[in-house]
């Protein structure tokens, strides 16, 4: 990418120990940052009508969480009170991000590696990335996240597993993208007894003692997830790599056949029998392609990155790197290592640049997370 991906500002991603406390703790430690995050993410730069609709969408999101008896609703209510403006409930239920993720045996030896690129079309959120260290009865886990976000999108639990969520294909209802999206959201609002995929992944990090237990939680067909999702999970052994596809209460598992297995996923199913159409709302500097071609290219490229050393965002190429890319993570649970890079686009630029970086080196119960020098 030449100099496209060089940072303009060197910064460190803060690593915040929250113990067993809820997600509101991140807000209480940095309330101004949390307010700035909500203000930027829900500004006109994300969507021209978003500031006008935020209040209504926030109330609908709160009502939906209450109807589901969501286990993290009280946390999100505390976040909303700490922020003091509409947006907390909406940001904890919005499902508009895309991703490219791969899991494979680490070529450097020692366990399995997860490479994860998170794309999210909300403006200015890259600079607000933090790493939260949570404590559980099975040991800590680290979540690359934002203040006030109750779910887990990307995480690493030392000596247990690493995992991330990709948004799955949109399930067509009428065949037209806009109408399909409207119908899908109306169905979600009317649903009962469903759980956001990010909350299911948090449950796995909180409750699972190891890779196998995490797969049991994520593949449990008694759990109906609100929106389709793709989970990528890497354990502590080279062959502990799996992709879990979730559509409602249906699950499909794609396990590593051997230690040489590598799988890259974008926002398209691996299983041919699951319905849905690929997503792609991002922009690159190249010619536009179909969502099918975009997803195929990202899945192939993110999988190919597992063949050797990975230097983070500097090694990414379009379309894996695109206008919506806000975070790049590489994690190895066996070594207790996780590197997180936050990205934001400079003014007038399509592609984002790395604006902050952090590293986790977890050596045992007495160790602490270390932020790396600014990149």
Image (cartoon, grey):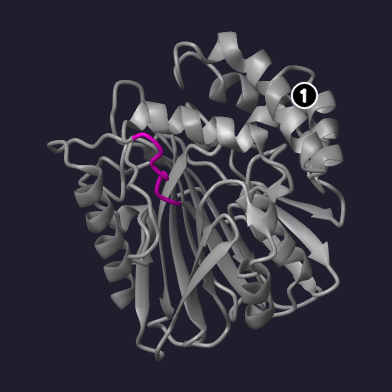
Using residue 314 as the reference point, say whether residue 375 is left or right of it. Answer: right
Residue identified by numbered label 1: 83
User: Measuring 64% from the left and 40% from the top, which residue is drawn there?
Assistant: 146
Q: Note whether 203 is above or below 342 in the view shown.
A: below
Please provide the residue range marked out in magenta.
168-174
Q: Nearer the viewer, residue 354 or 268?
A: 268
Classify residue 157 by image quadrant.
Answer: bottom right
In reply to whether residue 328 is colored magenta, the answer given is no
Residue extending furthest left?
287
Classify residue 4 by image quadrant.
Answer: top left
Can I make out residue 361 in this image? no
Using residue 269 as the reference point, say whether residue 54 is left or right of it. Answer: right
Name the magenta segment's main secondary structure. loop
| Residue 268 x/y as whole percent | 35, 55
| Residue 215 x/y as whole percent | 61, 75
Q: How many marks?
A: 1
């Amino acid at each position: 990418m030449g100099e496209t991906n060089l940072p303009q500002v060197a910064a460190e991603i803060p690593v915040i120990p929250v113990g067993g406390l809820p997600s509101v703790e991140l807000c209480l430690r940095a309330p101004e940052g949390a307010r700035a995050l909500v203000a930027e993410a829900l500004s006109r730069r994300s969507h021209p009508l978003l500031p006008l609709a935020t209040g209504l969408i926030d109330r609908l999101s709160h009502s939906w969480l209450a109807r589901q008896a969501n286990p993290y609703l009280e946390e999100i209510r505390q976040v909303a009170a700490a922020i003091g403006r509409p947006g907390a409930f909406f940001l904890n239920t919005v499902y508009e991000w895309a991703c490219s993720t791969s899991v494979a045996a680490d070529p450097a030896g020692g366990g399995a590696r997860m490479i994860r690129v998170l794309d999210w079309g909300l403006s200015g959120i890259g600079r607000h990335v933090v790493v939260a260290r949570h404590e559980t009865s099975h040991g800590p886990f680290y979540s690359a996240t934002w203040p006030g976000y109750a779910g887990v999108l990307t995480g690493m639990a030392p000596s247990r597993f690493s995992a991330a969520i990709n948004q799955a294909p949109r399930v067509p209802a009428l065949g037209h993208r806009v109408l399909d999206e409207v119908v899908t959201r109306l169905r979600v609002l009317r649903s009962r007894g469903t759980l956001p995929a990010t909350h299911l992944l948090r449950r796995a990090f909180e409750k699972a003692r190891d890779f196998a237990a995490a797969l049991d939680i994520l593949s449990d067909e008694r759990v109906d997830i609100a929106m389709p999702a793709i989970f990528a999970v890497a354990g502590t052994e080279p062959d502990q790599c799996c992709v879990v596809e979730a559509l409602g209460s249906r699950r499909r598992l794609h396990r590593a056949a051997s230690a040489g297995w590598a799988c890259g996923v974008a926002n398209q199913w691996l299983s041919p029998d699951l319905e849905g159409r690929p997503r792609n709302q991002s922009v690159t500097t190249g010619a536009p392609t179909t969502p099918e071609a975009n997803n195929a290219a990202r899945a192939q490229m993110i999988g190919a990155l597992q063949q050797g050393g990975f230097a983070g965002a500097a090694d990414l190429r379009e379309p894996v790197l695109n206008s919506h890319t806000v975070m790049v993570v590489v994690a190895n649970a066996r070594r207790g290592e996780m590197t997180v890079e936050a990205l934001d686009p400079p003014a007038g630029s399509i592609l984002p640049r790395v604006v902050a970086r952090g590293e986790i080196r977890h050596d045992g119960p007495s160790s602490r997370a270390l932020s790396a020098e600014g990149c």
